Amino acid sequence: MSDAAIQVDLVSDFVCPWCWLGYKQFMAAAQSSKNRPELTFRPYMLDPTVPEDGQDYRAYMTAKFGEDSKDRFKESRAHLEKLGKDYGIAFDFSAISRRPNSLNAHRLLKWAQGQDAGPAVAEAIFRAYHEQGQDIGDTKVLCDIAEQAGLDGSLVRELLARDDDKLEIQQEIMFFRGLGISGVPTFIYNGQFAVQGAQDPATHKQAFRQAIDNPPQG
């Protein structure tokens, strides 16, 4: 059976730290497996109501989770920081000052995947936000990421200034919501079954074997 027998759609949002961890865990499994999956990033927005230019992170967290939001997530963040180190991630939650709208980041990733630069751009966006606290809704930040991945920064800037494919991305997000996906990351194998959440490489290796036995339809 060829490697193409494993097709994986990763539904994720760049503001979700578990999505980056989950992707790295998936890649650890893929890189040590003889059955290499074909991965496609799919867009999701945990909170599509965030203004297009984003908002103050502390104010956002307080409004959404209450005054004790910092303490409330302290244990979870410490756990993420510990797990992240095993996969080359240096989470720095204290660096985050803006809660961005991630729509334009998803648009950039879509274009990057069309030029075989998807993984590089995805990694750069995750790293910019979760390690460096950059505003990944900001056009300059996204253009810099594009250029570093070998894309045409001027063209990306021009595309981001237009609304051409915003509706397409939003419709794709609604499609996955319609499938019942309410949490990310979600890995959809061969369009038939899903692995949800950040799972260790062993879990994905088991999913690889299941996918080989259940090849894509059509």
Image (cartoon, grey):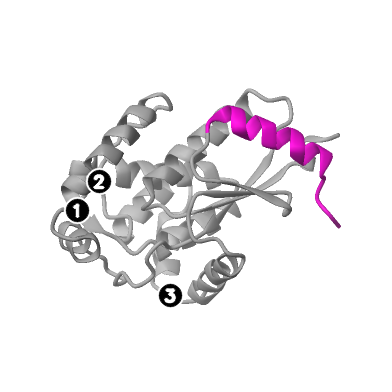
Task: State the quadrant of the N terminus.
Answer: top right
Residue labelled with disc 3: 162
Q: Would you say the residues marked 1 and 2 are in contact, meaning their CB atoms lie under 8 Å apart?
A: yes
Amino acid on which the number 3 mark rests in the picture = Arg
Q: Would you say the residues marked 1 and 3 are in contact, meaning their CB atoms lie under 8 Å apart?
A: no
Measured along the vertical axis of the image, is residue 208 above or below residue 159? above
SS under mark 2: loop
Q: Nearer the viewer, residue 120 or 37?
A: 37
Measured along the vertical axis of the image, is residue 50 above or below residue 78? below
Q: Residue at x 63, y 31 (%)?
A: 30
Tag on residue 73?
2
Amino acid on which the number 1 mark rests in the picture = Ser
Residue labelled with disc 1: 69
Residue 148 visible to an observer of this rendering: no
SS under mark 3: loop
Residue 183 visible to an observer of this rendering: yes
Q: Which portion, as a residue range, is magenta?
A: 200-218
Q: Main secondary structure of the magenta part?
A: helix
Q: x, y (%) of residue 110? A: 54, 58
Can you tell which of label 2 and label 3 is closer to the viewer? Answer: 2
Task: State the quadrant of the C terminus.
Answer: bottom right
Q: How many marks?
A: 3
Q: Residue at x 41, y 61 (%)?
A: 46
Disc 1 to disc 2, C-alpha distance: 6 Å
Q: Residue at x 62, y 65 (%)?
A: 179
SS under mark 1: helix
Q: Earlier in the sequence, mark 1 or mark 3?
A: 1
Residue 208 on the magenta span: yes
